[in-house]
Amino acid sequence: MTTDALEGGFADPAMDSARAFRAVMTAMARPGTIHRLDGATPPAPLSPAAGAVLLTLCDADTPLHLAGATDCPAVRQWIAFHIGAPISGAADCTFALGRWEDLDHDRYPVGTPEYPDRSATLIVETDRLTAEGARLSGPGIRDTATLSLPESGLYSRNRTLFPLGLDLILTCGAQVAAVPRTTRVQFPATEDR
């Protein structure tokens, strides 16, 4: 293990994880809102927000799938030291981390009718996170919200699976937003996705 893996965790774990948990839960409760989330300095290619999400939501009992460039020795060592989350395959994970294009959305658990909560949450690293683009509506949104999302059929598939489905946490630098499975997503000049 490199000495870099020993650094980059929360400076004040109790307070920093409480702040991060609140930011993530507020983002989930109010889809489309963007929140500041920092305090972690994980190794590249992870953003501070993605590192904070991992430090807050993952532990030794939450299997984590790493996709694309996030599956590298530096990230694996950092996760092993700070979190202890077991690295798993896509079909067995509780959380999956990667860029949109690296996450194979059809491979993750969506829960079962008896246990819809046994689904994966995708932590999606993005280049841009702004309040423009796709229109969001549904629980937690007064009328509509807008969020820069990649176009995908995942959103409409997710809606047809409800109460099963995937939840999304989007990270960019020190920002976080969320799109839970209950959110309806429409893109300009397109139908419901």
Image: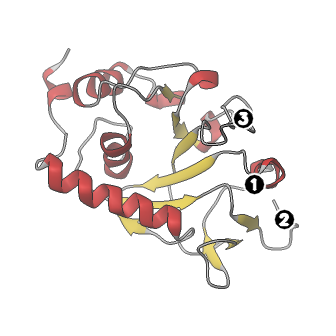
* For residue 113, side relative to residue 179 (left or right): right
Q: Amino acid at mark 3?
A: Thr
Vertical arrangement, residue 29 with respect to residue 73, above or below: below
* Callouts 2 and 1 close, C-beta under 8 Å: yes
**Sequence-first disc among 3 and 1:** 3
Could you say which disc has been placed on residue 174 in the image? none
Which element type, helix, strand or loop, lies under badge 2?
loop
* For residue 16, side relative to residue 72 (left or right): left
Vertical arrangement, residue 134 with respect to residue 96, above or below: below
Q: Amino acid at mark 1?
A: Tyr
* Residue topped by disc 1: 155
Could you say which disc has been placed on residue 112 in the image? 3
Vertical arrangement, residue 60 with respect to residue 142, above or below: above
User: Which residue corresponds to the image point at 35% horizontal and 19% vertical from the top-left?
Assistant: 73
Which element type, helix, strand or loop, lies under badge 1?
helix
Residue 102, x across and y down, in percent: 61, 34
Q: Amino acid at mark 2?
A: Asp
Q: To which quarter of the image does residue 99 belong?
A: top right
Mark 2 closeness class: few <14, some 14–19, many ≥20 residues within 10 Å? some
* Residue topped by disc 2: 192
Distance CA(mark 2)–CA(mark 1): 8 Å
Q: Nearer the viewer, mark 2 or mark 3?
A: 3
Residue 58, x across and y down, in percent: 37, 36
